[in-house]
Amino acid sequence: MKLGFFGINFGVCTDPETATAVAQAAEATGYDSVWTGEHVVLPDPQVPPSPAPPDTPMLDPAVSLAYVAAGTKTIKLGTGIIILPQRNPAVLAKELASVDVVSGGRLIFGVGVGYLKPEFDALGIPFERKGARTDDYLEAMLALWTQEHPEHHGPFASFEGIQAMPRPHQHPYPPIVIGGHTAPAYRRAVQRGNGWYGFALDLAKTEASLAGLRDAAAAVARPAALGPLEISVTPTEVLDRDVVRRYEDLGVHRLILLGLGATKQDLLDLVRATASDSGIG
């Protein structure tokens, strides 16, 4: 089992010194990764299904991870997730390739389709067909990262006769993790992802999601080059050795701690205690 930390770019971790200290503590105690979340804007006032109050501070994932990379050496840097259909794929490909280069190849690219219509409206992005837009944008980014002469002609993105250097440090590209708890997300993970990420799940919901992934694997082909699908979950339970074992028995490979705390010291204590109590660190 691997152990990650979610929230390196929001709340008290928007203070760069706090984010660096938390990432360094995680690295020192055996965590394999730190993860960002993303919402460019939040509805004000907060209304379901918005996940946070509108005044919640949240740094851009690429900016946050590049900063944390400078203060760490080995810990992986995950976007958990970036809302891909809200982004320009060529610009995002450049930003994330840059993070992978400056970190020496530590980026994990977590992708989601989004679910807050007010956020899409504010950004001028159609809420309809966001799944199809996600797939097209992902193909466009992979073209920029892998093709000698990048070219892509899709329903939402199209280019040729261009270059985008540097390419990511990792070859052929950083691991792609698909987030989401729906049948389309499961199919996307099987067909396109190196991993799948389930956020804020308990054991029962994790088991249901893994069943959904098995159903998807029976329905769509998985490219052999992707290898086994790595399963990551942010659990709602407090992590101790028994809880870790139960997730491991389900087939989960990484548990990503939800990093909530009012102060820097709260987060440092949480990181260290969870490493000790879970037996992972």
Image (cartoon, grey):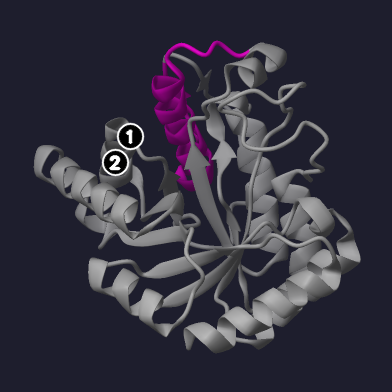
Q: Residue at x 20, y 56 (%)?
A: 224
* Residue at x-position 70% and y-position 17%: 123
Rendering coords of residue 43 (x, y %): 71, 22
Q: Residues within 10 Å of mark 1 (few under 14, many from 20)?
A: few
Magenta residues, as a range? 125-154
| Image x and y of residue 241, in percent | 42, 84
Q: Is residue 17 visible?
A: yes
Q: CA distance from mark 1 to mark 2?
A: 6 Å
Assess whether mark 2 and mark 1 are in contact (beta carbons under 8 angstroms).
yes
Q: Residue 204, how many percent across, how many down?
A: 29, 55
The vertical placement of 104 against 11, above or below, is below
7 part of magenta stretch? no
Q: Quadrant of the C terminus?
A: bottom right
Name the residue tied to disc 2.
186
The answer to which image quadrant residue 70 occupies is: bottom right
The residue that label 1 is drawn on is: 182
Name the amino acid, label 2: Tyr
- 93 left or right, relative to 235: right
Asked whether residue 30 appears in the rendered view, the answer is no
**Residue type at mark 1?**
Thr
Quarter the N terminus occupies:
bottom left
Residue placed most toward the observer, 136 or 9: 9
Mark in front: 1 vs 2: 1
Does residue 170 appear left or right of residue 163 in this picture?
Answer: left
Residue 75 location, quadrant: bottom right
Q: Residue at point 26% right, 67% down?
A: 251
Q: Position of residue 107 (x, y in %)?
A: 58, 60
